[in-house]
Amino acid sequence: LRRKRLVKTSKQPGKTRSVNFFRVDFKGNPSLYMVDLPGYGYARVSKSSKEEWVHVINSYFEETKDLRLVFLLMDIRRDLRDEEFYALEMARNIGTPCILVATKADKVGTSMRKGRILAIERTSGMRPVACSALTGLGLDILWKAILDSTRKNKAKST
């Protein structure tokens, strides 16, 4: 999954406008689907588009029966917005483990990164995982969480 161009990305937030499914096969572990939902926190789109995305995300959370893990991605340089607090609350309400991922950690220095992690933790009540796609920082933690969630899935089905 470290392939470049697997998913279309943009420097501008809010480019994902649909639900995208990616099947991941692991040797010795069950297959899983990773699902990329629209991110709307900092997207420069109309209010009606944001409302539509909220509906799509709500529907996905409510209708998905085998949701094992949620990653909420946020830019480490920004504060959480109401939409992100709402998404965290949705994950909590359905009892799905949620990991707050502070992306773009390579864009800030070490001391600022530590300060931002503490600030995000104070406001969210969750310790975020600082990550960087560029340097690989934090990706091992995310992969471990993903693999652990597939093992829990396997244990529940036996």
Image: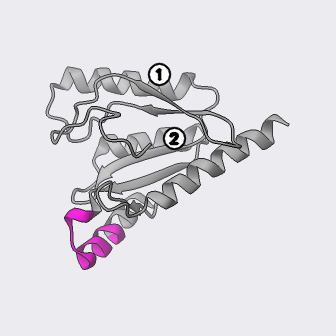
Magenta segment's dominant SS is helix
Can you say which quadrant of the picture contains the C terminus? top right
Q: Quadrant of residue 26?
A: top right
Q: Left or right: 47 with respect to 134?
A: left
Task: Name the residue rendered at 49%, 60% in the picture.
Answer: 140
Residue 130 position within the rendered picture, expressed as x and y whole percent measured from the top left: 37, 63
Can you say which quadrant of the picture contains the N terminus? top left
Rendered position, 46 above or below 112? above
Magenta stretch contains residue 90: no
Q: Identify the magenta region.
A: 106-118
Q: Left or right: 36 with respect to 62?
A: left
Which residue lies most toward the bottom here?
111
Residue 44 position within the rendered picture, expressed as x and y whole percent measured from the top left: 14, 34
Task: Name the residue rendered at 34%, 22% in the picture.
Answer: 18
Seen from the viewer's position, the closer of residues 3 and 141 is: 3
Residue 149 position within the rendered picture, expressed as x and y whole percent measured from the top left: 64, 46
Q: Amino acid at mark 1?
A: Ser
Colouring mode (rainbow / by chain / secondary structure / one colour)? one colour
Rendered position, 113 above or below 138? below
Please give the label number shown on residue 39. none
Rendered position, 119 above or below 63? below
Magenta stretch contains residue 117: yes
Please give the label number shown on residue 59. 1
Q: Quadrant of residue 101?
A: bottom left
Q: Quadrant of residue 112?
A: bottom left
Q: Left or right: 42 with respect to 133?
A: left
Category of crowding for the residue at label 2, using alpha-carbon neighbours closer than 10 angstroms: few (below 14), some (14–19), many (at least 20):
many
Please give the label number shown on residue 91. 2
Disc 1 element: helix
Category of crowding for the residue at label 1, using alpha-carbon neighbours closer than 10 angstroms: few (below 14), some (14–19), many (at least 20):
few
